[in-house]
Image (cartoon, helix red, strand yellow):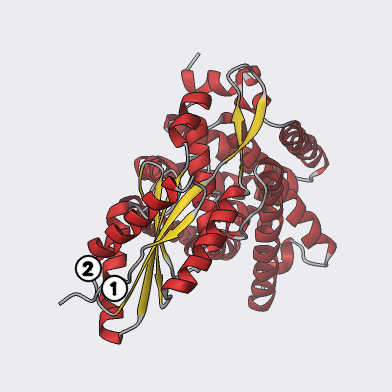
Amino acid sequence: MPRYWSRLSAPTSWTLWHERMRVVVLVVAVDGAAVVLSLAALVGSTITASDLLRFGLLAGMSVVYLEVSRQVEHRRRLLVATDSSHIDASSVWLLAAVMILPAGTTAALAILIYVHLWLRSWHRVSGVRPYRVVYNGATVTLTCIAVLTIVHATSFGRDGIRDAGGAFAFAAVAIVLFRLVNRLLIASAIAVSVGIHRLSAVFGSLANNAMEFSTLVLGAATAVLVVQVPPLVLLVLPAVFLLQHRALLKQLVEAATIDTKTELLNAAAWRQLAQRELERAGRQKTATAVLVIDMDHFKRLNDTYGHLAGDEALKAVGEALADELRGYDAVGRFGGEEFVALLPAVDGATAVGVAERVRERIASVQVRVERRTGGIGTIAVAASVGVAAAHGGVELDDLLRAADGALYAAKAAGRNAVRRAPTQVTTAA
C-alpha cells in the first residue's frame, strides 16, 4: 500500500487523539456531518446527463490544473507555515460547481479534489497532519452543500445564470456565502484549538483575502462559461496558473523576510526596516525607541519540556508582541529567545510604558506543553526588556547596544523587569 495512502487509512495513529477533547469532538462532528450530508445529497439529487458532463468538465480541469502545477503547489506549501493556509485554487472549481451542479455532484467534486490534492501534492509536505487535511476537505464539502441549500431557498436556482443580470446577482450571493460559511467553519477549529486572539487568524491578511476573492471570481466566471460557452472555459486555466505563481512569488518574499517560528520579521529584514526608520527620523528630527525583549529562563523551559514546547513559547510571545504593539512598529525575532521592536515617534518615557505593557502581556501568556510524565499542561513565561531612545538620526548598532545594556540591567534586577538606558543615544555625526 502506498505510504501516502496508509497515512490517511490509519486514523488511530493521527495526532488528533492527542489534542484537547473539544478539538476531537469538533473534528469528528464536522467530518461525520460532511459524510452524512454528502451521502444524503447524492441520494436525493436528480442528476441529468448535462450535470454529468459539467461535472466531468470541472473535474477534468481541476485534475489538469493540479498535475500541471503540482511542483509549484508543492513548493508553495513548503514555504507557508504548515496547515496555516486555507486558501487554494480549488475554490475556482468548487464555486463553479455550486452555481451549476446539484448538491450530490458538487459534494462528489469536493471530495475528488481533496483526495487528489492529498495523493499528488500535500502528502509530500513534511508536517502536514492528515486529520487537518480531512477536516479542511469536510469544511469545504459542508460549505458547498450549505451555500447550495441557502441559494436555492432564496429563489436562486441553476437557471440564475441564464442572463447577465441573473448571473451577476447569483455570483455575488454565492461568493459572499461561500466565503462566510467556510470562514465560520475554519474559525470554529481555531477557536477550540488555540483560541482567537487576532481577527487576522480567522480572516487572513489583506493579500490572502485578495487571492481568495480572485479565485472565487474566477469560479463564477467558470460557471458562466460552462453554461454559456463551454469551449471557452479552458481560458480559465491560464488565469488560475497566474494566480498561483503570484502566490508563490509573494511567499518567496515572505520566506526571505519572515521568521518561520514566530511569523515576525527575521533579523536581516528587521535591521533593514529599522535602518530606514532611523534614517527617516534623522531627516525629520523625530524620536525613536528600541525595545530588546529576552525571554527569561528559556533554556530551562527547553530542558524541562523539550524543544517543541520552546517553539510554542516563542510563537506565543511573538503573537503577544504583534497584538500589543502598533501595526507600523517594526517587530522581529533577533535570534534564539530574543526579540526586538523599533518604535517610531516614541520618546524614552513613553517607550518605558510600552515596555511595561509588553512585559505584563508576556507574563499573562499560558503555553500548552506535553509533560514528560504524560498529559497536557500549561506553563507561564516571562521576559526582561531593555529600552533605549534617541532623537534624530543615530546608528542602529549604537541604539541596540544601549538597549542591550539596559536588558542586562533588567536581568540583574531579578528578571521579568524593564530597564531603560541611563542616557539618550546621541545623534550620529
Label drawn at residue 16 = none
Asked if the residue at tag 1 contacts the one at tag 2, i.e. Cβ–Cβ closer than 8 Å, the answer is yes
Q: Is residue 306 left or right of residue 174?
A: left
Tell me how far mark 2 sits from mark 1, CA to CA. 8 Å
101 and 73: which is toward the camera:
73
Q: Is residue 108 left or right of residue 307?
A: right
* Crowd tier of the residue under label 2, counting other residues whose Cα lies within 10 Å: few below 14, some 14–19, many 20 or above: some
Q: Which residue is at a point 77% across and 33% down the rendered structure image?
A: 25
Up/down of 209 relative to 23, above or below: below
Disc 1: which residue: 278
Q: Nearer the viewer, mark 2 or mark 1?
A: 2
Q: Which residue is at a point 43% across and 68% down the rendered structure image?
A: 329
205 and 323: which is toward the camera:
323
Residue with the most extreme bottom position: 284
171 and 286: which is toward the camera:
286
Give the image location of residue 70, x and y in percent: 39, 40
Q: Amino acid at mark 2?
A: Glu
Residue with the most extreme top position: 1
Up/down of 94 relative to 171, above or below: above
Q: Which residue is at a point 72% across and 68% down the rendered structure image?
A: 160
**Res. 389 in view:** yes
| Marks 2 and 1, the one that precedes in the sequence | 1
Q: Amino acid at mark 1?
A: Leu
Give the image location of residue 243, x and y in percent: 41, 59
**Res. 162 in view:** no
Up/down of 308 relative to 285, above or below: above
Disc 2: which residue: 395
210 and 63: which is toward the camera:
210
Give the image location of residue 151, x and y in percent: 77, 62
Judged from the image, the secondary structure of the residue bearing numbered disc 1 is: helix
* Crowd tier of the residue under label 1, counting other residues whose Cα lies within 10 Å: few below 14, some 14–19, many 20 or above: many
Judged from the image, the secondary structure of the residue bearing numbered disc 2 is: loop
